[in-house]
Image (cartoon, coloured by chain):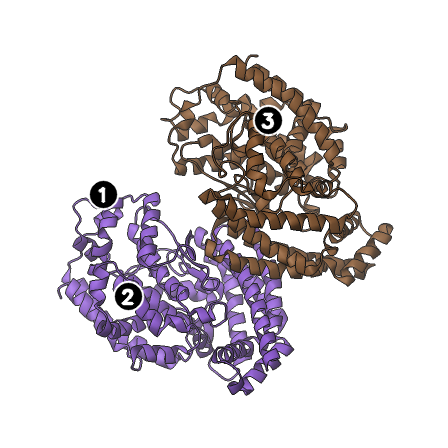
Chain colours: A purple, B brown
Amino acid sequence: MEAIVKRFKEQLEQLRVYDHAMGILYYDMETVMPKGAFALAGDTLGALSEVSYKLRTDETFVSDMQAILANPDQVDPITLCEAKRMNEDRERIACIPIEEYVAYQVESTAAFSAWQEAKAKNEFALFLPHLEKLIDYTRRFALYYKPDAPVYDTLLDEYEKGLTTEMLDGFFRDVRSALVPLIDRIRKNGYQPDTSFLEQRYPIEKQRELTKTLMQVMCMDPDHSTCGEVEHPFTTNFTKADVRITTHYYEDAVQSSMYSVIHEAGHATYELNVGDEIARSPLGTGVSMGVHESQSRFFENIIGRSEPFIEAVYPKLTELFPEQLKGVSAHAFYLAVNKAEPSLIRTEADELTYSLHIMVRYELEKQLIAGTLKAADLPKAWNAMYREYLGIDVPNDTMGVLQDSHWSGGSFGYFPSYAIGSAYGAQLLKRMERDLDVWGLAKAGNLAPIIAWLKERIYQYGCRLDPKELMEQAFEAPFDPNYYIEYLTEKFTELYRL
Amino acid sequence: MEAIVKRFKEQLEQLRVYDHAMGILYYDMETVMPKGAFALAGDTLGALSEVSYKLRTDETFVSDMQAILANPDQVDPITLCEAKRMNEDRERIACIPIEEYVAYQVESTAAFSAWQEAKAKNEFALFLPHLEKLIDYTRRFALYYKPDAPVYDTLLDEYEKGLTTEMLDGFFRDVRSALVPLIDRIRKNGYQPDTSFLEQRYPIEKQRELTKTLMQVMCMDPDHSTCGEVEHPFTTNFTKADVRITTHYYEDAVQSSMYSVIHEAGHATYELNVGDEIARSPLGTGVSMGVHESQSRFFENIIGRSEPFIEAVYPKLTELFPEQLKGVSAHAFYLAVNKAEPSLIRTEADELTYSLHIMVRYELEKQLIAGTLKAADLPKAWNAMYREYLGIDVPNDTMGVLQDSHWSGGSFGYFPSYAIGSAYGAQLLKRMERDLDVWGLAKAGNLAPIIAWLKERIYQYGCRLDPKELMEQAFEAPFDPNYYIEYLTEKFTELYRL
């Protein structure tokens, strides 16, 4: 068994090497690669993914895993868990013919590039053929894996193990029935905070300094983290040694990058704090997108858009932007960054109406994957649903169906993670408040104890526990979306004095 | 033979994939990777280089190459040349035991990181143990390859095929005996141009705009090129589809990045213009560092520091920096960026005294490799030689022996390429002037015909010709360093009215 474990670990290290190389290439494509090199990078990624596929489905590797799984008493718990995870991974991909697997990698690079161009030119037609191919691949791969399961459930399970359409339908129904009347009351109420000071010119050099401060407040170790500049912010990591957030600076919207940075820093904090004992293991990363988004949205909204936290960072804001924030109190800033109003762009949406953006995507994804909505009809369906759910007209596809990158990367079933994550966050807060003076800490800008609490309950485990098990352990209770509904209702009732 | 060629080409594509992945990782390390991840990247690079080594020395690959080389009439000239180059490459590495080859890759990553820290902290001792190891590896590898040749000649040959210590000794003797009296006459003359306007504050945002303009003037296609920001500028490329220059902006020295960008753009122009028929071939890149530096230094100095070129870009400079250049004529700017004076930093040195910086490094390298100078004694020897050759005192190691990155990457024998390249450039100019109105074009900011001329004679060939053959074909004559001496003498005699 010792020899088996040694060989198994060596193969895991080989896999890490290919993941690292491919991850850096993807990061490079998103940040600096000139677009004329995307085809070349696609070929390189295709070739590397072929090697990765072979390593992950290699006969000796599979028999080693099975030997480990068959003898749980003879190995340490980390190795056992690694074998379990790698076996799940193998089951998901080994059913896909290798040529299709590689062709998909190459196609998804081309699709990403086509989407970028389509968005820049406001021409959905440029992206359409790629979108069709990606939907086709996605559906095919899901059916290879689980021929008898509803395809969309298989996809959901990939991003948040255990999540189903049935559960989400109920979740979104509850959320919608609570939030739509609340949003209506705000609309009828007529009052909106002053946000004019946010629309001034905030020099990008100064915004970069703000990013540094926020990363410090989020306890991100500069030896192991960095912030890049991209069109669509994301976080990526190569083990916990190298965790990268990204942002996009808009000179006329300081809050955009500010909250994007806090959001991505929430993802990064999760990755930076997995246990050292699994630092280089495939277990040493966040377990699911739902849990990940729970962290990013917890820090972005629950902490970051709270009045105590804004009070903590406000001296830095006024130091960097004395002209722009002249005569603006921390309280006025707090009201402005919480202005709730249906809008066009998901990533810029306020905390209250955000879930409606997710619901639109959820409904459309389901139909695209079921085949009841053709990709060609997507822009029309998108616009109709924005009218129905958010009451607004979409002026063009760039600000509509082309706004997000997810589908261009073949990520169908990802979006619900944002809503589930938000709901996890609200329940975490309730539990956390029993142990910590959350708002006292936020007001002091001292997030370290909050991060330590989350590390203890969530981060350190990496992928060692399934999402459901992990979150129930953290909550000390089953998941209950009512915390989310209560949190939003309370916050916005008070904010808008309803 | 058809099957052999097909298999040979597939292996070349595999090699390209690994070169691409490793190259992007190196680029990432130099530009964005947090330093706490260097050890991880070192392991990844080690593992990838092991695969690359195996691909390059693989038995079937070797027998395919030999079959191609034995049947030159049965294959096209490009394939034949590829086999020749890959066989040379194999001869150079197959003699190195694979464990040592991989260990060297890992060590050179560690050395680079240690050098960065040593330079930042002005602590040569941090770098010393790594330097010792690198010298040891370098010497060992050279002796594996050519047990009976002088080690330093083997190294020179790697960067500029055919170059020898004997030839360089003569070259530097001639250059030195011509330039030292010239530099002396300038010193005694007493006159120096006004450079005070260069020492003002030039905002980095504006300098970034200048970079864009310079890249346009250098005809760099933005779909295939980009400019990154680093501590020590360099150029790298992944086929001709993705050619990257880098620069470093100093707010109080606009000419630093300006000439760095033109220098690196000279490298990039070479890579961007290799023939399309060898675009993805191992032949599709610059043939040697000497030829490469001939291009970078031709554009940086011969074109970029000429009065006609400065007249061409001066309207942009005054548009970007109206305050800083108020009352400063193009002629005054020309004089200022050509100020000749012994100085501390190679990359900031003027065209005239530059070769003295190279001579220092050349003499020290020879001794380090011969073992007549111990690495521990290098700072002392460096400082003594700066006194002797340039007449100046080195205040600390950061501005002395630690200033350049080359040795930290194991590049011993590289530095002479800069001087040889400068000399190539002067001879190219002479030949070019017979075909083109070089100065009329420079004055019009129209470098396209100059680049086309260089493409015709040099760039398109990539590695298809040896440096000597290539340059003699371009010169239509043997290499003659007197052109370089004459060029400098003429330019600086006129500049300083000697």
Q: Residue at x 28, y 79 (%)?
A: A480
Q: Earlier in the sequence, mark 2 or mark 1?
A: 1
The residue at the point 56 percent across, 23 percent down is: B306
Marks 2 and 1 on same chain: yes
Q: Residues within 10 Å of mark 2 (few under 14, many from 20)?
A: few
Judge by depth and name the residue closer to the eye, A323 or B2.
A323
**Which residue is nearer to you in this view: A351 or B137?**
B137
Q: Residues within 10 Å of mark 3 (few under 14, many from 20)?
A: many
Residue on which the image places disc 2: A449
How far across and how far down the image is residue A239, in percent? 47, 64
**Mark 1 burial class by Cα count in 10 Å: few <14, some 14-19, many 20+:** few
Number of callouts:
3
> The numbered mark 3 sits on a residue in which chain?
B
Where A167 falls versus B373 (above or below)? below
- Residue at the (54%, 33%) spot, across then down: B383
Q: CA distance from mark 3 to mark 1?
A: 47 Å
Check disc 1 and report the residue beneath it: A322
Which residue is at the far left? Answer: A497
The residue type indicated by label 1 comes to: Pro
Q: Is residue A212 visible?
A: yes
- How far apart are the alpha carbons under marks 2 and 3? 61 Å
Give whichever of A232, A401 is nearer the camera. Answer: A232
For the residues carrying marks 2 and 1, which lies nearer the camera in this image? 2
Residue type at mark 3: give it.
Answer: Ile
For disc 1, the chain is A
Q: CA distance from mark 2 to mark 1?
A: 31 Å
Which residue is label 3 attached to? B302
Relative image position of residue B184 (x, y in whole percent): 57, 17
In the rendered image, which quarter contains the C terminus of chain B?
top right
